[in-house]
DNA sequence: GCAAATACTTGATGTATGTTAAGAAAGCTG
DNA sequence: CAGCTTTCTTAACATACATCAAGTATTTGC
Protein backbone atom coordinates (compact mmCIF):
# COMPACT_ATOMS: atom_id res chain seq x y z
CA UNK A 1 0.00 0.00 0.00
CA UNK A 2 1.20 3.43 -0.94
CA UNK A 3 1.50 5.51 2.23
CA UNK A 4 -1.14 8.23 2.04
CA UNK A 5 -0.36 11.86 2.73
CA UNK A 6 0.34 12.52 6.38
CA UNK A 7 2.27 14.72 8.80
CA UNK A 8 4.34 12.18 10.71
CA UNK A 9 7.66 13.52 9.49
CA UNK A 10 6.84 17.23 9.95
CA UNK A 11 5.66 16.46 13.48
CA UNK A 12 8.94 14.71 14.27
CA UNK A 13 10.91 17.54 12.62
CA UNK A 14 9.36 19.95 15.08
CA UNK A 15 11.79 18.53 17.63
CA UNK A 16 14.68 16.89 15.77
CA UNK A 17 16.25 17.50 12.37
CA UNK A 18 16.19 14.49 10.09
CA UNK A 19 18.35 13.67 7.09
CA UNK A 20 16.48 12.45 4.00
CA UNK A 21 17.75 8.91 4.57
CA UNK A 22 16.52 9.00 8.17
CA UNK A 23 13.10 10.07 6.98
CA UNK A 24 13.14 7.12 4.65
CA UNK A 25 14.01 4.68 7.41
CA UNK A 26 11.28 6.03 9.65
CA UNK A 27 8.64 5.96 6.95
CA UNK A 28 9.43 2.40 5.97
CA UNK A 29 9.02 1.25 9.56
CA UNK A 30 5.43 2.43 9.81
CA UNK A 31 2.55 0.58 8.29
CA UNK A 32 -0.59 2.44 7.23
CA UNK A 33 -3.87 0.87 8.30
CA UNK A 34 -7.40 1.94 7.50
CA UNK A 35 -9.91 1.35 10.28
CA UNK A 36 -13.67 1.48 10.11
CA UNK A 37 -15.72 3.37 12.71
CA UNK A 38 -16.13 1.64 16.12
CA UNK A 39 -13.26 -0.74 15.37
CA UNK A 40 -11.48 -2.13 18.44
CA UNK A 41 -7.74 -2.28 17.87
CA UNK A 42 -6.95 -3.50 21.39
CA UNK A 43 -8.83 -5.35 24.12
CA UNK A 44 -7.92 -5.93 27.77
CA UNK A 45 -5.90 -9.10 28.20
CA UNK A 46 -4.24 -8.90 24.78
CA UNK A 47 -0.61 -7.92 24.46
CA UNK A 48 -0.51 -4.58 22.70
CA UNK A 49 1.35 -5.10 19.41
CA UNK A 50 1.35 -1.53 18.10
CA UNK A 51 1.25 2.12 18.90
CA UNK A 52 -0.54 4.38 16.44
CA UNK A 53 0.04 7.77 14.88
CA UNK A 54 -3.33 9.13 13.79
CA UNK A 55 -3.32 10.46 10.23
CA UNK A 56 -7.09 10.90 10.02
CA UNK A 57 -9.85 10.17 12.50
CA UNK A 58 -10.45 9.88 16.24
CA UNK A 59 -9.54 7.13 18.68
CA UNK A 60 -10.22 6.65 22.36
CA UNK A 61 -8.81 4.40 25.06
CA UNK A 62 -10.96 3.33 27.95
CA UNK A 63 -11.52 0.61 30.49
CA UNK A 64 -14.65 -0.99 31.86
CA UNK A 65 -15.03 -1.28 35.63
CA UNK A 66 -16.62 -4.12 37.63
CA UNK A 67 -20.04 -2.52 37.26
CA UNK A 68 -19.70 -2.45 33.49
CA UNK A 69 -19.21 1.32 33.31
CA UNK A 70 -16.81 2.64 30.67
CA UNK A 71 -14.14 5.12 31.77
CA UNK A 72 -12.40 7.02 29.00
CA UNK A 73 -8.89 8.10 29.75
CA UNK A 74 -7.74 9.32 26.36
CA UNK A 75 -9.31 10.79 23.24
CA UNK A 76 -6.91 11.56 20.41
CA UNK A 77 -7.30 13.26 17.04
CA UNK A 78 -5.19 13.79 13.92
CA UNK A 79 -1.42 13.95 14.41
CA UNK A 80 -1.66 12.50 17.90
CA UNK A 81 -0.33 9.20 19.19
CA UNK A 82 -2.38 6.57 20.93
CA UNK A 83 -1.66 3.20 22.49
CA UNK A 84 -1.64 1.28 25.74
CA UNK A 85 1.95 2.19 26.53
CA UNK A 86 2.16 -0.01 29.60
CA UNK A 87 1.24 -3.07 27.56
CA UNK A 88 3.18 -2.02 24.46
CA UNK A 89 6.49 -1.36 26.18
CA UNK A 90 6.36 -4.04 28.88
CA UNK A 91 4.52 -6.60 26.76
CA UNK A 92 2.10 -7.20 29.62
CA UNK A 93 -1.59 -7.88 29.05
CA UNK A 94 -3.44 -4.67 28.21
CA UNK A 95 -5.79 -3.10 30.72
CA UNK A 96 -7.54 -0.93 28.15
CA UNK A 97 -9.66 -0.97 25.07
CA UNK A 98 -8.58 1.16 22.15
CA UNK A 99 -11.25 1.98 19.61
CA UNK A 100 -11.91 4.27 16.66
CA UNK A 101 -14.77 6.75 17.04
CA UNK A 102 -14.71 7.60 13.33
CA UNK A 103 -13.41 5.81 10.27
CA UNK A 104 -9.69 6.43 10.69
CA UNK A 105 -6.32 6.07 9.11
CA UNK A 106 -3.34 5.33 11.32
CA UNK A 107 0.34 4.58 10.95
CA UNK A 108 1.25 1.69 13.20
CA UNK A 109 4.58 0.38 14.45
CA UNK A 110 5.38 -2.68 16.50
CA UNK A 111 7.52 -2.77 19.61
CA UNK A 112 10.28 -4.79 17.96
CA UNK A 113 10.33 -2.58 14.87
CA UNK A 114 10.46 0.54 17.03
CA UNK A 115 13.46 -0.77 18.99
CA UNK A 116 15.16 -1.54 15.68
CA UNK A 117 14.32 1.94 14.46
CA UNK A 118 15.84 3.50 17.58
CA UNK A 119 19.06 1.70 16.65
CA UNK A 120 18.93 2.89 13.02
CA UNK A 121 17.88 6.46 13.86
CA UNK A 122 19.09 7.30 17.38
CA UNK A 123 17.62 10.80 17.05
CA UNK A 124 14.25 9.18 17.48
CA UNK A 125 15.06 8.48 21.13
CA UNK A 126 15.28 12.22 21.49
CA UNK A 127 11.98 12.78 19.73
CA UNK A 128 10.17 10.28 21.94
CA UNK A 129 11.96 11.58 25.02
CA UNK A 130 10.53 15.02 24.30
CA UNK A 131 7.13 13.57 23.40
CA UNK A 132 6.84 11.65 26.68
CA UNK A 133 8.17 14.58 28.64
CA UNK A 134 5.37 16.72 27.27
CA UNK A 135 2.80 13.99 27.71
CA UNK A 136 3.88 13.60 31.34
CA UNK A 137 3.65 17.33 32.05
CA UNK A 138 0.21 17.27 30.49
CA UNK A 139 -0.97 14.30 32.49
CA UNK A 140 0.12 16.02 35.71
CA UNK A 141 -1.80 19.14 34.77
CA UNK A 142 -4.87 17.07 34.07
CA UNK A 143 -4.36 15.34 37.42
CA UNK A 144 -4.17 18.69 39.19
CA UNK A 145 -7.30 20.01 37.63
CA UNK A 146 -9.17 16.79 38.38
CA UNK A 147 -8.15 16.87 42.02
CA UNK A 148 -8.54 20.54 42.68
CA UNK A 149 -11.14 22.11 40.45
CA UNK A 150 -14.83 21.39 39.88
CA UNK A 151 -16.06 19.51 36.84
CA UNK A 152 -17.65 22.75 35.72
CA UNK A 153 -14.32 24.58 35.59
CA UNK A 154 -12.72 21.68 33.75
CA UNK A 155 -15.46 21.73 31.15
CA UNK A 156 -15.27 25.51 30.76
CA UNK A 157 -11.50 25.23 30.26
CA UNK A 158 -12.11 22.77 27.46
CA UNK A 159 -14.59 25.17 25.88
CA UNK A 160 -12.19 28.09 26.30
CA UNK A 161 -9.39 26.17 24.57
CA UNK A 162 -11.92 25.60 21.82
CA UNK A 163 -10.96 21.99 21.97
CA UNK A 164 -11.67 20.11 18.71
CA UNK A 165 -12.75 17.10 20.71
CA UNK A 166 -15.94 18.93 21.73
CA UNK A 167 -17.08 19.11 18.11
CA UNK A 168 -16.24 15.56 17.22
CA UNK A 169 -17.23 13.19 19.96
CA UNK A 170 -20.56 12.49 21.70
CA UNK A 171 -21.16 14.36 24.93
CA UNK A 172 -21.26 11.20 27.02
CA UNK A 173 -17.66 10.47 26.02
CA UNK A 174 -16.56 13.96 26.96
CA UNK A 175 -18.24 13.54 30.33
CA UNK A 176 -16.33 10.33 30.93
CA UNK A 177 -13.08 11.97 29.82
CA UNK A 178 -13.75 14.75 32.36
CA UNK A 179 -14.43 12.16 35.03
CA UNK A 180 -18.16 12.82 35.48
CA UNK A 181 -21.49 11.33 34.38
CA UNK A 182 -23.35 12.42 31.23
CA UNK A 183 -26.16 13.73 33.47
CA UNK A 184 -23.75 16.02 35.30
CA UNK A 185 -22.27 17.36 32.08
CA UNK A 186 -25.75 18.05 30.78
CA UNK A 187 -26.53 20.06 33.91
CA UNK A 188 -23.28 21.99 33.63
CA UNK A 189 -24.05 22.90 30.04
CA UNK A 190 -27.55 24.00 30.94
CA UNK A 191 -26.32 26.27 33.73
CA UNK A 192 -24.01 28.18 31.42
CA UNK A 193 -26.57 29.21 28.82
CA UNK B 1 33.08 18.96 46.98
CA UNK B 2 33.65 15.24 46.84
CA UNK B 3 30.50 13.58 45.53
CA UNK B 4 29.03 11.47 48.34
CA UNK B 5 27.94 7.92 47.84
CA UNK B 6 24.80 7.61 45.77
CA UNK B 7 22.95 5.41 43.30
CA UNK B 8 22.59 7.69 40.28
CA UNK B 9 24.71 5.49 38.02
CA UNK B 10 23.16 2.16 39.08
CA UNK B 11 19.72 3.66 38.53
CA UNK B 12 20.68 4.73 35.01
CA UNK B 13 22.31 1.35 34.35
CA UNK B 14 18.98 -0.31 35.03
CA UNK B 15 17.98 0.87 31.57
CA UNK B 16 21.13 1.59 29.55
CA UNK B 17 24.66 0.19 29.68
CA UNK B 18 27.30 2.80 30.29
CA UNK B 19 31.01 2.71 29.52
CA UNK B 20 33.31 3.87 32.33
CA UNK B 21 34.06 7.09 30.46
CA UNK B 22 30.35 7.76 30.03
CA UNK B 23 29.81 7.31 33.76
CA UNK B 24 32.56 9.85 34.31
CA UNK B 25 30.96 12.36 31.99
CA UNK B 26 27.60 11.98 33.67
CA UNK B 27 28.99 12.26 37.19
CA UNK B 28 30.94 15.38 36.40
CA UNK B 29 27.81 17.08 35.06
CA UNK B 30 25.93 16.77 38.33
CA UNK B 31 26.54 18.97 41.31
CA UNK B 32 25.85 17.70 44.82
CA UNK B 33 23.94 20.08 47.07
CA UNK B 34 23.04 19.69 50.71
CA UNK B 35 19.71 21.19 51.68
CA UNK B 36 18.34 21.86 55.13
CA UNK B 37 14.81 20.84 56.11
CA UNK B 38 11.97 23.06 54.78
CA UNK B 39 14.29 24.64 52.22
CA UNK B 40 12.54 26.02 49.14
CA UNK B 41 14.55 25.27 46.01
CA UNK B 42 11.98 26.77 43.63
CA UNK B 43 9.20 29.34 43.89
CA UNK B 44 6.41 30.20 41.45
CA UNK B 45 7.51 32.89 39.02
CA UNK B 46 11.17 31.86 39.02
CA UNK B 47 12.69 30.08 36.04
CA UNK B 48 13.59 26.58 37.18
CA UNK B 49 17.36 26.25 36.84
CA UNK B 50 17.76 22.62 37.89
CA UNK B 51 16.23 19.22 38.16
CA UNK B 52 17.24 17.08 41.12
CA UNK B 53 18.13 13.46 41.73
CA UNK B 54 17.48 12.73 45.40
CA UNK B 55 20.38 10.95 47.10
CA UNK B 56 18.98 11.31 50.61
CA UNK B 57 15.84 12.95 51.92
CA UNK B 58 12.33 13.87 50.82
CA UNK B 59 11.09 16.68 48.58
CA UNK B 60 7.64 17.80 47.57
CA UNK B 61 6.28 20.03 44.83
CA UNK B 62 3.07 21.94 45.39
CA UNK B 63 1.17 25.04 44.43
CA UNK B 64 -0.94 27.45 46.40
CA UNK B 65 -4.40 28.34 45.09
CA UNK B 66 -6.18 31.71 45.25
CA UNK B 67 -7.55 30.86 48.69
CA UNK B 68 -4.08 30.17 50.02
CA UNK B 69 -4.54 26.40 50.18
CA UNK B 70 -1.51 24.24 49.35
CA UNK B 71 -1.98 21.43 46.84
CA UNK B 72 0.77 18.82 46.74
CA UNK B 73 1.25 17.12 43.43
CA UNK B 74 4.47 15.22 44.02
CA UNK B 75 6.31 13.72 46.96
CA UNK B 76 9.63 12.08 46.12
CA UNK B 77 12.12 10.04 48.14
CA UNK B 78 15.64 8.65 47.67
CA UNK B 79 16.64 7.74 44.11
CA UNK B 80 13.74 9.67 42.63
CA UNK B 81 13.81 12.75 40.43
CA UNK B 82 12.02 15.97 41.16
CA UNK B 83 11.64 19.29 39.38
CA UNK B 84 9.17 21.59 37.71
CA UNK B 85 9.68 20.05 34.29
CA UNK B 86 7.49 22.54 32.47
CA UNK B 87 9.61 25.42 33.75
CA UNK B 88 12.91 23.56 33.48
CA UNK B 89 12.52 22.43 29.89
CA UNK B 90 10.66 25.41 28.46
CA UNK B 91 12.36 28.01 30.66
CA UNK B 92 8.98 29.50 31.51
CA UNK B 93 8.19 30.88 34.97
CA UNK B 94 7.52 28.08 37.43
CA UNK B 95 4.01 27.40 38.68
CA UNK B 96 5.15 25.34 41.65
CA UNK B 97 7.08 25.42 44.85
CA UNK B 98 9.66 22.71 45.41
CA UNK B 99 10.70 22.15 49.00
CA UNK B 100 12.59 19.68 51.17
CA UNK B 101 10.57 17.95 53.90
CA UNK B 102 13.75 16.61 55.57
CA UNK B 103 17.37 17.63 55.46
CA UNK B 104 18.32 16.28 52.03
CA UNK B 105 21.15 15.68 49.64
CA UNK B 106 20.49 16.07 45.94
CA UNK B 107 22.44 15.94 42.69
CA UNK B 108 21.41 18.85 40.52
CA UNK B 109 21.89 19.56 36.83
CA UNK B 110 21.02 22.63 34.82
CA UNK B 111 19.11 22.67 31.57
CA UNK B 112 22.10 23.79 29.52
CA UNK B 113 24.40 21.23 31.09
CA UNK B 114 21.86 18.48 30.49
CA UNK B 115 21.58 19.36 26.81
CA UNK B 116 25.37 19.29 26.59
CA UNK B 117 25.38 15.92 28.34
CA UNK B 118 22.86 14.52 25.87
CA UNK B 119 25.34 15.44 23.14
CA UNK B 120 28.27 13.81 24.96
CA UNK B 121 26.35 10.70 26.04
CA UNK B 122 23.48 10.11 23.59
CA UNK B 123 22.44 7.01 25.54
CA UNK B 124 21.09 9.37 28.15
CA UNK B 125 18.32 10.37 25.77
CA UNK B 126 17.27 6.76 25.91
CA UNK B 127 17.41 6.70 29.70
CA UNK B 128 15.26 9.80 30.02
CA UNK B 129 12.94 8.58 27.28
CA UNK B 130 12.28 5.47 29.35
CA UNK B 131 12.06 7.48 32.58
CA UNK B 132 9.43 9.85 31.17
CA UNK B 133 7.57 7.00 29.55
CA UNK B 134 7.23 5.34 32.94
CA UNK B 135 6.41 8.60 34.67
CA UNK B 136 3.69 9.25 32.11
CA UNK B 137 2.16 5.80 32.51
CA UNK B 138 2.21 6.36 36.25
CA UNK B 139 0.59 9.76 36.05
CA UNK B 140 -2.21 8.32 33.92
CA UNK B 141 -2.81 5.59 36.49
CA UNK B 142 -2.96 8.17 39.24
CA UNK B 143 -5.37 10.19 37.12
CA UNK B 144 -7.59 7.16 36.65
CA UNK B 145 -7.72 6.34 40.31
CA UNK B 146 -8.41 9.97 41.21
CA UNK B 147 -11.29 10.18 38.75
CA UNK B 148 -12.83 6.82 39.33
CA UNK B 149 -12.20 5.56 42.84
CA UNK B 150 -12.98 6.97 46.28
CA UNK B 151 -10.36 8.62 48.43
CA UNK B 152 -10.67 5.67 50.78
CA UNK B 153 -9.64 3.17 48.10
CA UNK B 154 -6.74 5.37 47.05
CA UNK B 155 -5.51 5.56 50.61
CA UNK B 156 -5.90 1.83 51.15
CA UNK B 157 -3.93 1.21 47.95
CA UNK B 158 -1.12 3.33 49.34
CA UNK B 159 -1.20 1.33 52.57
CA UNK B 160 -1.26 -1.96 50.66
CA UNK B 161 1.81 -0.96 48.62
CA UNK B 162 3.37 -0.23 51.97
CA UNK B 163 4.40 3.07 50.52
CA UNK B 164 7.43 4.60 52.30
CA UNK B 165 5.87 8.01 52.00
CA UNK B 166 3.33 7.07 54.68
CA UNK B 167 6.07 6.65 57.25
CA UNK B 168 7.96 9.76 56.39
CA UNK B 169 5.64 12.65 55.77
CA UNK B 170 2.94 14.31 57.90
CA UNK B 171 -0.56 13.06 57.35
CA UNK B 172 -1.82 16.41 56.11
CA UNK B 173 0.63 16.22 53.21
CA UNK B 174 -0.52 12.74 52.31
CA UNK B 175 -4.11 13.98 52.33
CA UNK B 176 -3.20 16.74 49.92
CA UNK B 177 -1.30 14.30 47.70
CA UNK B 178 -4.42 12.12 47.60
CA UNK B 179 -6.54 15.14 46.72
CA UNK B 180 -8.54 15.36 49.96
CA UNK B 181 -8.54 17.39 53.19
CA UNK B 182 -6.68 16.31 56.35
CA UNK B 183 -10.05 15.94 58.09
CA UNK B 184 -11.24 13.45 55.50
CA UNK B 185 -8.07 11.40 55.73
CA UNK B 186 -8.37 11.33 59.49
CA UNK B 187 -11.90 9.96 59.21
CA UNK B 188 -10.84 7.36 56.63
CA UNK B 189 -8.12 6.14 58.97
CA UNK B 190 -10.52 5.98 61.88
CA UNK B 191 -13.01 3.90 59.92
CA UNK B 192 -10.46 1.23 59.10
CA UNK B 193 -9.30 0.47 62.63
C1' DG C 1 10.58 19.43 81.44
C1' DC C 2 7.29 23.11 80.28
C1' DA C 3 5.18 26.35 77.13
C1' DA C 4 4.00 27.12 72.62
C1' DA C 5 3.44 25.66 68.22
C1' DT C 6 2.08 22.12 65.18
C1' DA C 7 -0.44 18.07 63.88
C1' DC C 8 -4.38 15.28 64.31
C1' DT C 9 -9.30 14.19 65.52
C1' DT C 10 -14.17 14.82 65.97
C1' DG C 11 -18.81 16.70 65.12
C1' DA C 12 -22.42 19.47 62.69
C1' DT C 13 -23.62 21.03 58.49
C1' DG C 14 -23.11 22.20 53.34
C1' DT C 15 -22.37 21.10 48.39
C1' DA C 16 -20.92 18.97 44.05
C1' DT C 17 -21.73 15.19 41.84
C1' DG C 18 -23.73 10.36 41.55
C1' DT C 19 -27.88 7.36 40.92
C1' DT C 20 -32.19 6.06 39.22
C1' DA C 21 -35.78 6.75 36.23
C1' DA C 22 -38.31 8.84 32.82
C1' DG C 23 -39.16 11.63 28.83
C1' DA C 24 -37.52 14.64 24.81
C1' DA C 25 -34.51 15.31 20.97
C1' DA C 26 -31.63 13.88 17.41
C1' DG C 27 -29.64 10.58 14.19
C1' DC C 28 -30.00 6.28 11.19
C1' DT C 29 -31.97 3.10 8.14
C1' DG C 30 -35.05 1.12 5.19
C1' DC D 1 -40.11 10.50 5.88
C1' DA D 2 -41.55 6.87 9.49
C1' DG D 3 -40.02 4.21 12.94
C1' DC D 4 -36.34 2.73 15.72
C1' DT D 5 -32.24 3.55 18.19
C1' DT D 6 -29.16 6.30 20.36
C1' DT D 7 -28.13 10.47 22.75
C1' DC D 8 -29.33 14.13 25.68
C1' DT D 9 -32.08 16.36 29.35
C1' DT D 10 -34.57 16.81 33.57
C1' DA D 11 -36.07 15.78 38.30
C1' DA D 12 -35.96 13.62 42.95
C1' DC D 13 -33.12 11.73 45.97
C1' DA D 14 -28.43 9.69 47.81
C1' DT D 15 -23.57 10.10 49.07
C1' DA D 16 -18.63 11.23 49.40
C1' DC D 17 -16.19 14.68 50.69
C1' DA D 18 -15.60 19.78 52.05
C1' DT D 19 -16.05 23.37 55.38
C1' DC D 20 -16.14 25.39 59.79
C1' DA D 21 -15.23 25.13 64.47
C1' DA D 22 -13.55 23.26 68.50
C1' DG D 23 -10.95 20.07 71.18
C1' DT D 24 -6.97 16.69 71.99
C1' DA D 25 -2.45 14.85 71.13
C1' DT D 26 2.23 15.34 69.72
C1' DT D 27 6.42 17.73 68.68
C1' DT D 28 9.70 21.47 69.17
C1' DG D 29 12.51 24.92 71.30
C1' DC D 30 14.23 27.06 75.28
Image (cartoon, coloured by chain):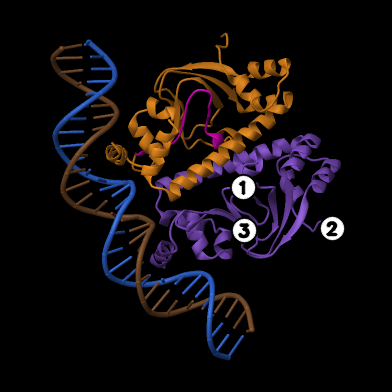
Chain colours: A orange, B purple, C blue, D brown
Which image quadrant is residue A49 in?
A: top right
Q: Chain of mark 2?
A: B
State the separation of the CA atoms marked 1 and 3: 11 Å
**Judging from the image, what secondary structure is the residue with disc 2 in?**
loop
Reading the image, the residue beneath label 3 is B99
Question: Quick check: do tags 1 and 3 share a chain?
Answer: yes
Reading the image, the residue beneath label 2 is B2
Label 2: few (<14), some or many (≥20) within 10 Å?
few
Q: Which residues are magenta?
A: A69-87
Q: Nearer the viewer, residue A56 or A61?
A: A56
Reading the image, the residue beneath label 1 is B84
Q: Are marks 3 and 2 in contact (CB under 8 Å)?
A: no
**Left or right of residue B172, residue B132 in this image:** right
Which image quadrant is residue B57 in?
A: bottom right
Q: Chain of mark 3?
A: B
Q: Position of residue A113 (x, y in %)?
A: 65, 24
Amino acid sequence: MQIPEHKLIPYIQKWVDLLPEEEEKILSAFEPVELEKKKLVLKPGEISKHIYFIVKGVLRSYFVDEKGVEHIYQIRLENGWIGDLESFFSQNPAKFYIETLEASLVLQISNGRLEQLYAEVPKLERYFRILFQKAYINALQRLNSTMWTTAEERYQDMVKENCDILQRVPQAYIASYLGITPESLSRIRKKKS
